[in-house]
Image (cartoon, rainbow, N blue to C red):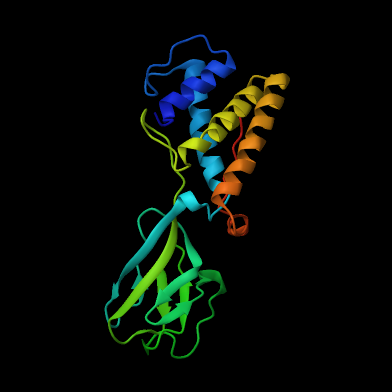
Amino acid sequence: MPRTYLSMTKAVANDAGYAGNITAISTATGDAARIARFVSEACQYVESLWGDWRFLWGGIYEGISPANEHTIVAPENLYRWDRDRIFIGDCKHYPIAFNDFIPYAGANSPGFVGQVVIMPNNDLRMYPYPDKDTEYHLSWFKQPMVLTNDLDEPNIPDQFRKIVEAYALWLYAMYDDSVELANKSQAEYEKWKLLLEADQRPGGYAGNQAMHNHINILAW
């Protein structure tokens, strides 16, 4: 059986020495609710460590941009574009961030697409915009999973989901001021992190940190 939000919460509770029975996330209270929250935050944290995790790849977003259309609307669950694999028409483009774009004469007119800009809402804007119907093939990465319901599952492959449990237990240990448990769970987390990166990031790059796609988690 795959590790779900509820089953991971139960596993962390057991390792933390919680004596109660957690039957559902929605009815958890007190320490049980706190542990569930740590599991959800741990999942987001791990999935946010790198923007190019293989398990976050959303596939190829394809379509046809009509003539005289400026914008390609981003997929609903977009985390970030795969900048190395953006094809519009017959050309490969390397999109730039909106803050780096400098308007120039003729940019806002029909013609051959020479520059692609990632807008603040993550849509892609083409300069100049195409003067004919133009195909696009865009690689992208999806958002980290936000665990909410009992049967929700991380994007992380099931065989590596112990990393979520280890990090959640580490958060709980820090909250509980348990030095021994914190050291043990931290070591377990670091072990699983190495295994996950070896499997899900070969040939990858640290594109995430530079783009500030990172979540800081504090125990409370």
Q: Is residue 123 visible?
A: no
User: What residue is shown at x 59% (from left), y 32% (from top)?
Assistant: 167
User: What residue is shown at x 40% (from left), y 68% (from top)?
Assistant: 138
User: What residue is shown at x 53% (from left), y 56% (from top)?
Assistant: 52
Q: 21 above or below 51? A: above
Quarter-of-image position of residue 209: bottom right
Q: Is residue 3 visible?
A: yes
**In the rendered image, which quarter contains the N terminus?**
top left
Quarter-of-image position of residue 206: bottom right
Q: Nearer the viewer, residue 4 or 115?
A: 4
Q: 15 above or below 91? A: above
Q: 28 above or below 123? A: above
Left or right placement of residue 3 versus residue 131 in this view: right
**In the rendered image, which quarter contains the C terminus?**
top right
Residue 31 in percent (x, y) is at 52, 17
Residue 21 in percent (x, y) is at 44, 12
Count of number-bearing discs: 0
Residue 153 in percent (x, y) is at 41, 36
Residue 23 in percent (x, y) is at 38, 16
Q: Nearer the viewer, residue 109 or 214?
A: 214
Left or right placement of residue 6 versus residue 207 in this view: left
